Amino acid sequence: RRAVTRARAAAPPRAMSEGAMSQVTVKVTIVELRHLVGLAGPGAAFSACAATHVRGDAVETPAMPLSLEPGVHKFEHTQSFTFDHTPLLINELIAQPLALRVSQVEAKSGDMTLLATGELLLDELLRGTRMETLVPLVAVLAPPAPVEGEEPALSPMLLVVIELSAPLVDADELDPDDGGLRVLELRLDGLRSLPARWLVEAGQATDA
C-alpha cells in the first residue's frame, strides 16, 4: 500500500543548533481598552479588567475605571516572562494566538463578568522584536439596538504591545519570499518490507 505524507518543521534557532541554551524574555503590555460597552449599557461607567496567558502564565490587569477620555480604560499594565529559546517556544508563540478576555469588575464584590474576547497572532515577531496592535474584540453580550439618528457604536478594541529581548530567529532563517520560517518538507512515497509487528489486521487494537 502506498501512502503520501507531508511533514513541515521549522528549522531550530541557531543558538540551539550550536548547542548553546539561550533565553528570551517576552514582555506583554496591555495598554488600553476602547469603546467596550458595560453591563449597564452605552455611556455608563464601569471598571474593566483584561487578561491573557503566555504559555500558561497569566497576564491580568488590575480593574480600571473609565478614564477622562470617553470610552477608554487606561491599563498600562506590563508583565515579563523568561523562557528557554527552543523550537517549542517559537511554535507556541507563533502558531498559537494569544486569547484575550475583557471582563467587568463589580466594585463591592470583585465579581467578574466576561464582556468580550479577542485573539492576537504573534507571527509579526518572526521579523522583529516588537509589535504594537489594536486587537478587535467580539462582545459576548448582544449590542443594544441602535437609536435612529445616532452614530453607530464603535467597535471595541484592546491595544497590546509585545516585546522580545532577542530575535526568535536569525534573518537568514526566514524565507525571503514571504518572511516566514524556512521549512523542511518530507514526502513519503511508500513503505516496503514492514516489520511484522507493524502489520495490523482490521479492527485489531494496537499497543503503539
Image: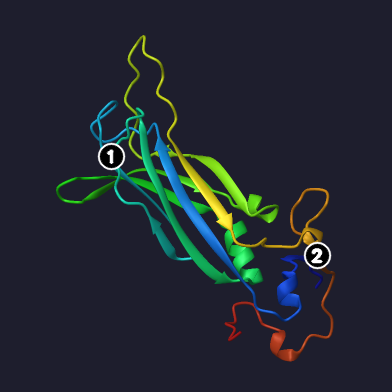
Query: What is the C-alpha distance between the residues marked 2 and 1?
Result: 51 Å
Q: Where is residue 57 in the image (x, y as percent from the top left)?
A: 43, 65
Label 2 packing within 10 angstroms: few (<14), some (14-19), many (20+)? few
Question: Residue, x 80% and y 55% (percent of image)?
Answer: 175
Q: In this view, does 145 lie above or below 200?
A: above
Asked which quadrant contains residue 88, the reply is: bottom right
Closer to the camera in the image, 8 or 11: 11
Residue at the spot of label 1: 65
Closer to the camera in the image, 48 or 190: 48
Q: Where is residue 43 in the image (x, y as percent from the top left)?
A: 28, 26
Mark 2 secondary-structure assignment? strand
Question: Residue, x 60% and y 82% (percent of image)?
Answer: 204
Q: Position of residue 5 (x, y in %)?
A: 76, 66
Kind of residue at disc 1? Pro
Query: Are the residues flagged by discs 2 and 1 in contact, CB closer than 8 Å?
Result: no
Question: How many marks overall?
Answer: 2
Give left or right: position of 151 versus 8. left
> Earlier along the polypeptide chain: callout 2 or callout 1?
1
Question: Residue, x 32% and y 34% (percent of image)?
Answer: 67
Q: Is residue 115 above or below residue 88?
A: above
Q: Is residue 30 above or below residue 70?
A: below
Closer to the camera in the image, 62 or 97: 62
Q: In this view, does 28 lie above or below 75?
A: below
Applied colour scheme: rainbow
Q: Which residue lies furthest to the top in this view?
A: 149
Kind of residue at disc 2? Glu
The quarter in which the N terminus is drawn is bottom right
Give left or right: position of 176 versus 132. right
Closer to the camera in the image, 182 or 201: 182
Residue at the spot of label 2: 185
Asked which quadrant contains residue 68, the reply is: top left
